[in-house]
């Protein structure tokens, strides 16, 4: 259908009481697998790259992969910089053609987070590209992201932060963790409801890998419009490749084991789209 920004799809999700799945991709095969799943489910979809993923192959490479796949798709596809860790990287993604940008200043002081986020939001607004930010700290470790001192999002701070930065969406910290969640998650859903009551912009849930599906659904019912999935996709792809090579130790064609990894990712993404309730919303 189109290579689009996240603005319209997230506003539609917010209004329709569902969430758009946002899936981190590491290579061409994962790009193809995610879009294939979204097409089968007729769901809008966001593909994401983190700073370390960008370091692996470069912004232009991922942009070219996603744009080419999106142009052949019959669903809306967005490309998002996940956890942009500097103004410079955010601007590089913007100039490359990314259709959505996150600037993560959550490790800064509250005031410094506002200054950094407003600077990125102002620059991206000129190009019509929406900006996501994070307030509070999602714990755990994923990619090069490490937070051993998580902190919940304060609803009053969220109101001030959104007003002073001009962001399009806000990632909130309510007890999820990056990576696979260990143990039973204790999510502060009442906090989420309070933030939703005070803010009109779409809210984002990070660290959903390993969180029970019903807990994710509850967060969506309470106002989440975008849900990020990363670790589960990496595991699915790697497990597929490892299983193929175990059965076929003499295999040497990357297309063979890559196809198995893709199939595994497609199945995981389809299940997450069901959890998000975005199937048929393209």
Image (cartoon, rainbow, N blue to C red):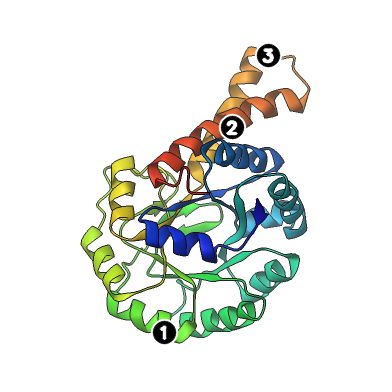
Q: Residues within 10 Å of mark 2 (few under 14, many from 20)?
A: some
Q: Secondary structure at mark 3?
A: loop
The answer to whether 173 appears left or right of 126 in the picture is left
- The residue at 61%/71% (across/down) is 129
Tag shown at residue 276: none
Marks 1 and 2, Cα distance to the nearest angstrom? Answer: 42 Å
- Label 2 and label 3: CA atoms lie apart by 15 Å
Q: Quadrant of residue 89?
A: bottom right
Q: Which of the 4 image quadrants contains residue 30? A: top right
Q: Position of residue 68 (x, y in %)?
A: 75, 48
Residue at 37% of width from left, 73% of height from top?
Answer: 200
Is residue 205 visible in the rendered image? The answer is no
Please name the residue that numbered disc 1 is placed on: 163
Of label 2 and label 3, which has the lower sequence position? 2
Packing grade of label 3 (10 A; few <14, some 14-19, many >=20) is: few
Question: Of tags 3 and 1, which is closer to the observer?
Answer: 1
Element carrying mark 1: helix
x, y percent for residue 105: 50, 74
Question: In this view of the protein, can residue 131 be seen by the observer?
Answer: yes
Residue 221 left/right relative to 180: left
Mark 3 lies on residue: 248
Residue on which disc 2 sits: 238
Q: Of the residues under marks 1 and 2, which one precedes in the sequence?
A: 1
Q: Is residue 198 above or below residue 209?
A: below
Please tell me whether mark 2 sits on a helix, a strand or a loop.
Answer: helix
- For the point 71% across and 42% down, the residue is 28
Residue 40 at x, y percent in the picture: 56, 35
Measured Cα–Cα span from mark 3 to mark 1 = 57 Å
> Where in the figure is residue 151, as x and y percent of width and height?
33, 67
Q: Vertically, is 108 above or below 29? A: below
How many C-alpha atoms fall within 10 Å of the one at disc 1: few (<14), some, or many (≥20)?
A: few
């Amino acid at each position: 259908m189109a290579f689009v920004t996240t603005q319209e799809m997230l506003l539609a999700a917010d209004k329709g009481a569902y969430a758009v799945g946002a899936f981190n991709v590491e290579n061409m095969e994962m790009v193809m697998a995610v879009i294939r799943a979204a097409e089968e489910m007729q769901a809008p979809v966001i593909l994401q790259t983190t700073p370390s993923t960008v370091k692996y192959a470069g912004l232009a490479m991922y942009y070219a992969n996603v744009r080419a796949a999106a142009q052949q798709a019959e669903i809306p596809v967005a490309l998002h910089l996940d956890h942009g860790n500097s103004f410079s990287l955010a601007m590089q993604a913007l100039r490359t053609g990314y259709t959505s940008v996150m600037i993560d200043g959550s490790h800064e002081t509250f005031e410094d987070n506002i200054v950094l986020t407003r600077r990125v939001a102002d620059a991206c607004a000129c190009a019509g590209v929406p900006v996501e930010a994070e307030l509070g700290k999602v714990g755990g470790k994923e990619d090069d992201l490490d937070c051993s001192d998580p902190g919940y999002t304060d609803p009053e701070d969220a109101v001030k932060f959104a007003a002073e930065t001009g962001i399009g969406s806000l990632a909130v910290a309510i007890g999820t963790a990056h990576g696979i969640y260990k143990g039973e998650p204790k999510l502060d859903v009442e906090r989420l409801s309070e933030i939703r009551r005070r803010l009109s912009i779409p809210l984002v849930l990070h660290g959903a890998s390993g969180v029970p599906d019903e807990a994710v659904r509850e967060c969506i019912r309470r106002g989440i419009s975008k849900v990020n999935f990363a670790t589960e996709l990496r595991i699915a792809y790697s497990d597929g490749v490892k299983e193929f090579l175990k059965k076929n130790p003499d295999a040497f064609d990357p297309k063979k084991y890559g196809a198995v990894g893709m199939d595994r990712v497609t199945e995981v993404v389809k299940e997450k789209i069901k959890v998000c309730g975005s199937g048929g919303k393209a």
